[in-house]
């Protein structure tokens, strides 16, 4: 899946992601708050040393995706919304449009 991730490791990509999309001021503010929340959670160590929270935007549906990722193996432990929900949304939009 083609996505631009924002995590503690890739916060600099947040600016590029925000600038590459045409966002309303409200969307930009909401995205900024979400990025800061993800950064705060990762810095808190709530998931331990081996896991981190990651924020991305699914390029097909343009919906936000939050993942819990193992930093060592890069394995996705949990994702919200799940991949199948994103694909259903993508299919629904394609059928409707």
Image: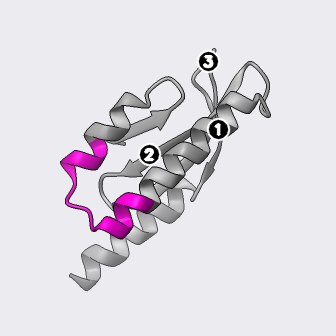
- Residue 23 lies, with reference to residue 74, above or below; the image says below
Q: Mark 1: few, some, or many residues within 10 Å (few <14, many ≥20)?
A: some
**Which of the image's four quarters has the N terminus?**
top left
Q: Is residue 15 magenta?
A: no
Query: Which residue is denoted by mark 1 in the rendering?
Result: 40
Residue 73, numbered circle: 3
Q: Is residue 28 magenta?
A: yes
Provide the major secondary structure of the magenta segment. Answer: helix
Query: Which residue is denoted by mark 2 in the rendering?
Result: 56
Q: Are marks 2 and 3 in contact (CB under 8 Å)?
A: no
26 or 84, nearer to the observer: 26
Magenta range is: 17-29
6 or 96, nearer to the observer: 6
Name the residue at 45% across, 61% down. Answer: 30
Label 3 vs label 1: CA separation?
22 Å
Q: Specify which label sits upstream in the sequence, 1 or 2.
A: 1
5 or 11, nearer to the observer: 11
Element assignment for label 3 = loop
């Amino acid at each position: 899946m083609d996505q631009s991730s924002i995590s503690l490791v890739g916060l600099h990509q947040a600016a590029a992601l925000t600038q590459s999309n045409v966002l309303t001021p409200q969307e930009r503010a909401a995205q900024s708050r979400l990025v800061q929340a993800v950064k705060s959670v990762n810095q808190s160590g709530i998931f331990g040393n081996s896991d981190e929270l990651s924020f991305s935007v699914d390029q097909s549906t343009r919906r936000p995706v939050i993942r819990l990722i193992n930093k060592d193996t890069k394995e996705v432990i949990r994702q919200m919304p799940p991949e199948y929900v994103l694909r259903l949304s993508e299919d629904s939009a394609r059928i409707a449009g």
